[in-house]
Image (cartoon, rainbow, N blue to C red):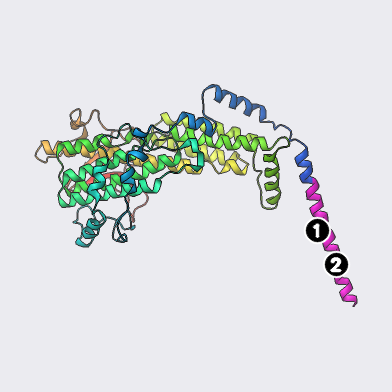
């Protein structure tokens, strides 16, 4: 009996302790709610920074984004203009043999496509001519609607766009293998035109456009190795390459800054005064008090975020290689100084996206140069140019330059064919060595034609 009574007293003491803890937390929560936070030391500097940005016309909310990037008129809206092409879906089960779709790589560009894969492609592309026909010849003034007016509720058909682009890429390879260069050129040209319709007014839009352009670059390299194209077809593909839209992150950075600034403004408001937002914020902080090592929000980090964006915009005028290296230093400094949970999470995706876009832009520049070389070969009995300078001005308006270091693009004859390449992110000329599954470092950004 004595042991039972001792156990009961222990449970009562434990219950009193728990009640005291909850009572203390409730008092602290009430005090935090009723007592407005004092302005932080950085508050005045942050207010001045926001005022200056607004005076300069910088977008700082989703509402301002919606006004700056309205949806295009119906006759210029890609979701409407390409309704039939985007609605297309493969019939039956997708063959695991298909590259891009099933995950397997294409055969080496110097080898014929095996019959089983050609049969799988033929089945997958059975109505691709109808898809091509439904895509207008001129898409220069057509854009996909981002739907900023609807905010996060907007329906954005990214999966349908990617599926269409993969189909056009496969169509280009398939028709080139059959020797139907005109049909292959049409598929590739329209694929690049569709990728350019993704307006750079969000990071997601920009990266979907980069991914699609990269897939189409792979397909065009394959096609150039499998068929001879007429001059007019080569010229039209070159004109469709979205080099300028790939290179600019101005719209994406503008959108990212505006969305994040809107969120941080809400958190900042929630930190002062008695309001519903502050109640929700304090409840969230209470629930996470034992798990958090950093505060949720600080004015100092909001100011740091805005200043880092200014620096990222300043870097846009520098060569890509210098831009990437300075951006890495900038991000390292940011990660060292930022202390709040929310702001910590914003930049990693942007830096990775910019690096990927830089490689894709370099690939497009190399591809445009390869298309010029193919035009030169047609006019010179298959002879290769002695240097890229020979292509100017008939096939290139100016001598092509490497986006990474702004030096002349590299070009090298091979035992069979040639390679055009950029030095890539490592800043080292590796002699035109391309990236593959076995070589994921010390590679160049290449377009190789082995015929």
Give the tally of numbered discs: 2
Which structural element holds mark 2? helix
Magenta span covers which residues?
Answer: 1-27
- Pointer 2 residue: 10
Taking the magenta stretch, the answer to whether it contains residue 88 is: no
- Give residue 278's position: percent from left, percent from top: 69, 40
Marks 1 and 2 in Cβ contact (< 8 Å): no
Q: Characterize the local packing of mark 2: few (<14), some (14-19) or many (20 or more) Cα atoms within 10 angstroms.
A: few
Residue sitting at x 53%, y 41%: 346
Tell me the residue at 81%/51% (across/down): 23
215 displayed left or right of 294? left
- Circle 1: element type: helix
Taking the view exactly as shown, the residue that stands out farthest to the bottom is: 1
Figure quadrant of residue 376: top left
Q: Give the percent coordinates (x, y) of residue 329.
A: 50, 38
**Left or right for 35, reference 134:** right
Q: Nearer the viewer, residue 171 or 358?
A: 171
**Pointer 1 or 2: first along the chain:** 2
Residue 248, position as x, y percentages in the image: 39, 33
Q: Which of the 4 image quarters holds residue 40?
A: top right
State the residue in front, 35 or 434. Answer: 35
- Judging by the rendered image, the residue that carries numbered circle 1 is 18
């Amino acid at each position: 009996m004595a042991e039972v009574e001792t156990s009961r007293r222990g449970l009562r003491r434990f219950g009193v302790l728990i009640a005291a803890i909850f009572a203390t937390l409730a008092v602290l929560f009430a005090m935090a709610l009723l007592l407005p936070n004092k302005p932080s030391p950085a508050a005045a500097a942050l207010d001045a920074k926001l005022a200056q940005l607004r005076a300069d016309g910088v977008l700082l909310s989703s509402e301002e984004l919606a006004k700056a990037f309205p949806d295009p008129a119906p006759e210029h809206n890609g979701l409407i203009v390409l309704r039939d092409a985007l609605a297309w879906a493969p019939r039956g089960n997708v063959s695991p043999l298909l590259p891009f779709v099933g995950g397997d790589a294409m055969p080496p560009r110097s080898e014929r496509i095996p019959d089983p894969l050609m049969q799988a492609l033929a089945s997958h592309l059975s109505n691709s001519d109808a898809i091509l026909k439904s895509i207008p010849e001129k898409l220069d003034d057509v854009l996909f609607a981002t739907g900023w007016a609807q905010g996060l509720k907007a329906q954005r058909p990214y999966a349908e766009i990617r599926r269409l682009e993969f189909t056009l890429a496969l169509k280009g390879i398939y028709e080139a293998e059959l020797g139907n260069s005109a049909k292959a050129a049409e598929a590739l040209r329209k694929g690049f035109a569709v990728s350019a319709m993704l307006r750079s007014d969000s990071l997601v839009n920009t990266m979907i456009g980069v991914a699609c352009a990269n897939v189409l670059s792979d397909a065009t390299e394959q096609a150039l190795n499998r068929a001879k194209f007429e001059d007019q077809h080569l010229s039209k593909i070159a004109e469709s390459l979205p080099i300028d839209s790939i290179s600019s992150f101005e719209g994406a950075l503008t959108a990212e800054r505006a969305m994040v600034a809107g969120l941080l403004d809400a958190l900042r408001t929630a930190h002062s005064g008695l309001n519903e937002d502050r109640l929700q914020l304090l409840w969230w902080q209470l629930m996470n008090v034992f798990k958090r090592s950093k505060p949720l929000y600080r004015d100092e980090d909001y100011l740091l975020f805005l200043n880092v964006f200014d620096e990222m915009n300043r870097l846009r005028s520098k060569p890509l290689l210098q831009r990437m290296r300075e951006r890495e230093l900038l991000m390292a400094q940011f990660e060292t100084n930022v202390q709040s949970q929310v702001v910590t999470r914003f930049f990693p995706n942007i830096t990775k996206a910019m690096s990927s876009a830089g490689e894709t832009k370099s690939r497009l520049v190399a591809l445009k140069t390869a298309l010029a070389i193919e035009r030169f070969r047609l006019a010179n009995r298959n002879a290769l140019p002695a240097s890229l300078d020979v292509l100017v001005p008939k096939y290139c308006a100016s001598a092509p330059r490497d986006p990474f270091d702004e030096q002349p693009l590299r070009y090298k004859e091979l035992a069979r064919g040639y390679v055009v390449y950029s030095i890539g992110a490592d800043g080292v000329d590796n002699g035109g060595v391309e990236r593959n599954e076995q070589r994921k470092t010390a590679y160049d950004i290449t377009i190789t034609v082995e015929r």
